[in-house]
Amino acid sequence: ASILDEMSADDVMLNFGDQSAPGLTFSVQVAAYSNPSNYRSAHLQGLGEIETVVLEDGITRFTIGKLTTLRAAKALQAKAKEKGQDAAFVIMFLNGKRTYLEKLINTGMFK
């Protein structure tokens, strides 16, 4: 079991919300499409530039924001949800590669 399994969302924010690390960025994924030309993003206008990321699975992910803390990314996620993007969630990249909070904790980057 992971340390995160035992923590509430509030505890996660309290412990890790304001931590940052060199090369670490947080974005909000707002959509994922195998056929990216089908995605419409006009409802997210004003939240920042929408970027596309294609990961190893070939699926195009649409993200907004390049933030340095989880707290800032969660705030942007909330704004995206307010604009109707219910499936928005935070993803993180370390030196350009997708990573996970659990890995940051296990490697000692986040304490």
Image (cartoon, rainbow, N blue to C red):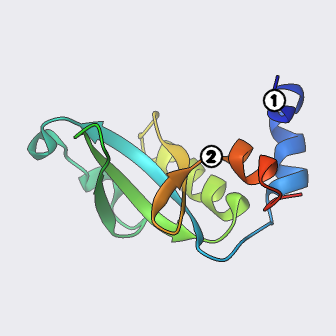
Q: Counting other residues with Cα less than 10 Å from the Cα at mark 2, is it few (<14), some (14-19), or many (20 or more)?
A: few
User: In which quarter of the view is residue 94 placed?
Assistant: bottom right
User: In which quarter of the view is residue 111 placed?
Assistant: bottom right
Residue at 66%, 64% (x, y): give it. 72
Residue at 41%, 40% (x, y): give it. 85
Locate residue 83, reporting x and y percent. Answer: 43, 47
The disc at residue 44 is none
User: In which quarter of the view is residue 47 placed?
Assistant: bottom left
Front-most of 83 and 88? Answer: 88
Disc 2 or 1, which lies upstream in sequence? 1
Q: Secondary structure at mark 1?
A: loop
Q: Is residue 67 left or right of residue 109?
A: left
Residue that lies at the very extreme toward the top in this rendered image:
1
Residue 104 lies, with reference to residue 33, above or below; the image says: below
The disc at residue 2 is 1
Disc 2 marks a residue whose amino acid type is Tyr
Q: Which residue is mark 2?
A: 100
Residue at 38%, 55% (x, y): give it. 63
Residue at 64%, 53% (x, y): give it. 74
Q: Is residue 13 left or right of residue 99?
A: right
